[in-house]
Image (cartoon, grey):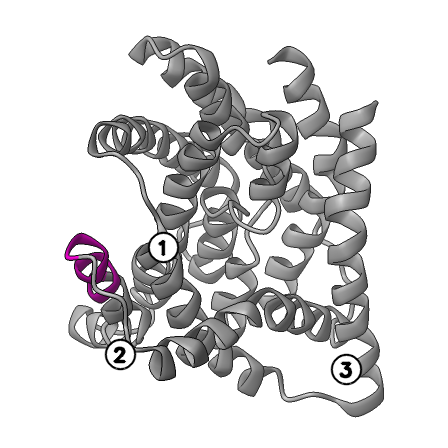
Amino acid sequence: MSYFTHIFIQNIIPLSILIGAGILLQRRFQLDIKTLSKLIFYVFSPAIMFRTLLESSISASLFWKILLFFVIFFSLLILVTEIVLRIKWSQKDNGRRVAFRHSVLFYNSANYTLPLNQLVFQGNPFAFSVQTVIMVIQTILPYTYGVYSINSHKQSLGKTLKTVFSLPVIYAIPLAVLCNFWEVTPPKPIYMPISYIADGFIATALITLGAQLGSMTWRFRLTELVWSNSLRLLVSPLIGAMVVWMLGFDGILADALILSCAVPTALNTVLLAVEFDNEPEYASQTVLSSTVLSMFTVTLVLYFL
């Protein structure tokens, strides 16, 4: 019960306040959602990615263990998702297929899972490091694979790759890794603005989600939401547990990895959908519904852990 209460107070309520603010602002002022989306893609995202990678401190051995887990887990999750897509949707519904795929594959590993990780493992630095690696990987994927998949059926490979490499976050990643490796810190007059921008990412992204929800007609695709939430919240942690068992991981490493697989759909799915005009209403519904339902499913996962 304490986990349920914590998830509700520490995750659902703060998220709801910012999302609600976005809904009210949209209803009152008719915000330009495309402009908000571009701010996030071209300003806030590269800043938070750069700062996260620059300030991370993780051993090489732990990194490779987590990466091995993630590659196997993500491959199996893609396989299960593609099986469901082949059964449920026609190949002609490319936009809907991509939106569904993203709702399962991209999950909230930052502002939802990091505080949850700290509660469950009582601030254990090792568990926090595990989640930090997952967060970095899950931040990179939407801006690479996600952008590619959402545009590949609309334009040629060359134009799709051009779109991917036009995003500043693609260049912020290697720059931050190199600065971290060589222990180079940008001058304070440069790094301070980056930190200020990074601090604003979560608030801006959630208000954008609220603005998108505020402009929706609220025609729910119930069947699609059930499938999406089931794969994201129930099947995903089961796959994670299976991979942990296969690799022989145990203790805090195993528990932290399984918990990281059990969280709701990432806000990035909405940002991608809005920026590239691909089922933004459905993407918003998956984030909202999975976040609310996760109060129950994550508590269930914690019970079994």
Q: Amino acid at mark 2?
A: Ser
**Who is closer to the viewer here, 241 or 234?**
241
Q: Which-is-in-front pick, marks 3 and 1?
A: 1
Specify the label residue 166 is tagged with: 2
Indicate yes or no whether the magenta region holds residue 104: no
The residue tagged 3 is 26
Q: Is residue 283 visible?
A: yes
Element type at marker 1?
helix
Residue drawn 38% across and 63% down? 51
- Decide if residue 75 is on the left or right side of residue 288: left
Residue at the (43%, 46%) spot, across then down: 135
Report, in whole angstroms, how far the alpha carbon at label 2 lies from the one at label 1.
Answer: 25 Å
- Please tell me whether mark 3 sits on a helix, a strand or a loop: helix
Question: Which of marks 1 and 3 precedes in the sequence?
Answer: 3
Q: Which residue is mark 1?
A: 55
Q: Considering the numbered disc 2 on the image, is that residue within a helix, a strand or a loop? A: loop
Determine whether 86 is above or below 164 in the image.
above
Q: Which residues are magenta?
A: 174-182
- Residue at x-position 47% and y-position 18%: 252
Tell me the kind of residue under disc 3.
Gln
Q: How many marks?
A: 3
- From the image, give the main secondary structure of the stretch colored magenta: helix
- The answer to whether 261 is drawn above or below residue 179 in the figure is above
* Dots 2, 1 in contact, CB < 8 A: no
* Location of residue 143 (image quadrant): bottom left
Q: Are marks 3 and 1 in contact (CB under 8 Å)?
A: no
Say which of marks 2 and 1 sits in front: 1
Tell whether 185 sits left or right of 249: left
